[in-house]
Image: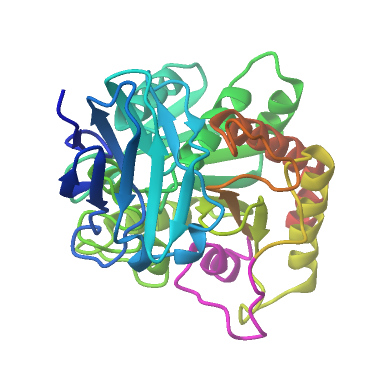
Amino acid sequence: MTLSVTSAFDSGNIRLVSQQDDRLELEIVKDHQSDFYQWFHFKLVGGAGREVELAITNAGGAAYVDGWPGYEALMSIDREEWTRVKSTSYEDGTLTIRLVPDTDCVYLAYFVPYSMERHLDLVATVAALPDVDYRSLGKTIDGQDLDYFQMGEGDLVVWMYARQHPGESQAEWWMEGMLEKLTDPDDPVSRKLLSECTFHIVPNMNPDGSKRGHLRTNAVGTNLNREWDNPTEEKSPEVLYVRNRMDETGVDFAMDVHGDEAIPANFLAGFEGIPSFDEKQYDLFKQFSSLLVANCPDFQEEKGYEVSKPGEANLSMSTTQLAERFGAVSMTLEMPFKDNDDLPDPIYGWSTERCKYLAHGCLNALAQLVPDLKARKKG
């Protein structure tokens, strides 16, 4: 059988450049109307029992080249279980994946995909639950619904939203785990949280980019997490809809969920450098981080992004915009594409199940922070 590849499906991305025997030269396709690229997801046909070499020749021009060293691609034969391809290497601008497939139908991806079909199943399941208010905040450029949930009856206003960058699919696996725990009627932590907080949840901020197989942008090449100071209907309707709803509800606590290509760890980024920086507000952010360390061994505080200097925060990003606009205790949660080097898993690396367990840890930490958040809100 002749080797072939295809990415003509939900979140697919690859292009065949050339083929010589069992070696395929491939390229990742740029996000539409953008220069960003790094996400790949494709099907390899006809490779059973053969020593196949897949060379992604434009990896050196990807958005985050530091993400390739130490990275291992993911492979699946059933699209359910995804394991790491140990013989993944990066050299001279080319990412090479070597494998001997067990079957003639194998899928490969940058991280475990979270399909739009699975997203629709998640939304339908949660929307059907009692005491959950579902609505569409509006239509995206490609005509998809921007799905939104509201649940809980407490005074604290909590916002959780994910996948502004669609290629960071671990963010929606985190969302699935968070929603499973939060809607479990037997979970005492969730029952307590729902009595003291009102949750506003957007499980996928960028459905168009997700379906198109983009790394970082929406249908017209807009990086949504650089639009929060001035979102528009033409370029960033997703942010406009969410920020308008936030203006109606207010925000006390917010978590924006992402993935990081290069850093092999889970970490938080905060709102240092905003013009109205307040020590008490920031202390609650640091307190949440410490609580998360205590609740989840997969989380740490040593590795992360460089902190902005006073007055130099980028207010076009959601975390800083919400901290400045609402005085929110807001944060960005980052998960690795590689693995958590402090607690590695040689077979799966950072996995979908670990995303879910981290979400559980975040809710546990939030429950412990609630008394101090309530005290701050009361003044």
Residue 56, image x and y in percent?
31, 53
Nearest the viewer among 70 and 92 is 92
**Residue 61 part of the magenta-drawn span:** no
Q: Residue at x 53, y 58 (%)?
A: 69
Residue 22, image x and y in percent?
25, 37
Residue 253, image x and y in percent?
64, 52
> Is 334 displayed left or right of 39 in the figure?
right
Q: Residue furthest top?
A: 186
Residue 21 picture quarter: top left
Residue 182, image x and y in percent?
61, 27
> Is 205 displayed left or right of 314 in the figure?
left
Residue 12 picture quarter: top left
Image quadrant for the N terminus?
top left
Nearest the viewer among 8 and 327 is 8
Residue 351 picture quarter: top right
Q: Residue at x 60, y 46 (%)?
A: 158
> Is 333 displayed left or right of 16 in the figure?
right
Q: Is residue 194 visible?
A: yes
Q: Residue at x 49, y 63 (%)?
A: 318
Q: 159 above or below 243?
A: above
> Is 346 displayed left or right of 23 in the figure?
right
Nearest the viewer among 224 and 184 is 224
Q: Is residue 139 visible?
A: no
Image quadrant for the C terminus?
bottom right
Q: 37 above or below 134?
A: below
- Magenta residues, dominant SS class: loop
Q: Residue at x 53, y 38 (%)?
A: 86
Task: Look at the image and name its color scheme.
Answer: rainbow
**Which stretch did the figure color magenta?**
305-328
